[in-house]
Image (cartoon, rainbow, N blue to C red):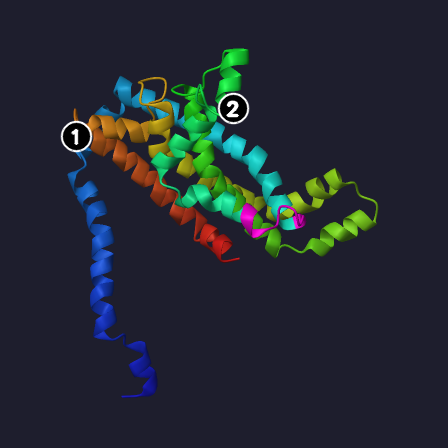
Amino acid sequence: MTRTAVARRPPWYLVVPGVVGVVFLALPLAGLVAQAPWGSIVELLGSPAVLQALRLSLITSVAATLIALVLGIPLAMLMTRTRAFGGAWVRALVTLPLIMPPVVGGVALLAAFGRRGLAGQLLFDVFGIQIPFTTAAVVIAEAFVAMPFLVITVEGALRSSDARLEQAAATLGARPWTVFRRITLPLIAPSIAAGAVLCWARALGEFGATLTFAGSFPGVTRTMPLAVYAALDVDRAEALALSMVLLLVSVLILVSLRGRFLQGLRR
């Protein structure tokens, strides 16, 4: 037996736990697919409550993604182009919602935007605006937890792009907005698209922060994940049907992006 053949054959102490790990991850998904009500899934997804949750999820997740694009792209550029925003503390702050327990994120949003929160008290006392337990609260919660996916993806693209092209354009007299529009934006456009898709998918699947900060009111704050949770006690078939929709979205996102986000994390 050659040395190459030995190297290509993984030892049993790696194969056994590796196979168990794959089965552990695949078994719940297989159970979901096996128990999904395929015969009545179209009928279940066409019910008024499900359509209401689907419509609300699409509206709020798209709105959250737009907010992330408006705020996240400039933030990513500042993180890569300026020293003040390029420190480890800013990157830690940006990535914190990724690892923060979702319920804690919801509590933090209440502390910031609740009627007695840091900003919420001013909004309520001066303008009479109450954010918690409204559709706006859903959008804010989704944007809070999803924007880091966009920022990290775009930041990785900016760090790997050739900054000399921007410098050359500036030297030739191009204004900053022109450099951004004609040079920077085309270079990072694929990563912006990938980050936006990831951001949208995360917003679509957000549960914990939304439940804590916005509640679960049909037609107002009950998105698809919250509808799945509510249906578990009432109609398990409906919960399985909605879960299949979310699972399908997740699979399509993973297939289409092909590890682009993970590459951004390694940069």
Report the side of 161 relative to 177 (left or right): left
Task: Describe residue 191's horizontal placement relative to residue 245 as left or right.
Answer: right
Residue drawn at (26%, 26%), measured in percent from left and top?
45
Mark 1, Cα crowd under 10 Å, few <14 / some 14-19 / many 20+, is some
Instruction: Say if residue 40 shows up in the picture.
Output: no
Provide residue 209's location: percent of width, then percent of height: 37, 32
The residue at 37%/36% (across/down) is: 104
Residue at mark 1: 236
Q: Is residue 142 visible?
A: yes
Identify which residue is drawn at 45% across, 48% down.
257
Residue 19: horizontal and vertical position, in percent?
Answer: 22, 62
Q: Relative to the observer, which residue lies in front, 113 or 31?
A: 113
Residue 36 among those drawn in magenta: no
When asked about the image quadrant of residue 10, the answer is bottom left
Q: Earlier in the sequence, mark 2 or mark 1?
A: 2
- Secondary structure, mark 1, is helix
**In front: 97, or 234?**
97
Disc 2/disc 1 C-alpha distance (Å): 40 Å
Asked if residue 16 is positioned above or below residue 228 in the image, the reply reads below
Quadrant in the picture for the N terminus: bottom left
Amino acid at pointer 2:
Ala
Residue 119, labelled with which disc?
2
**The disc labelled 1 sits on which kind of residue?**
Arg
* Left or right: residue 26 compared with residue 51: left
Q: For the magenta stretch, what is the residue range?
A: 81-90
Between disc 2 and disc 1, the foreground one is 2
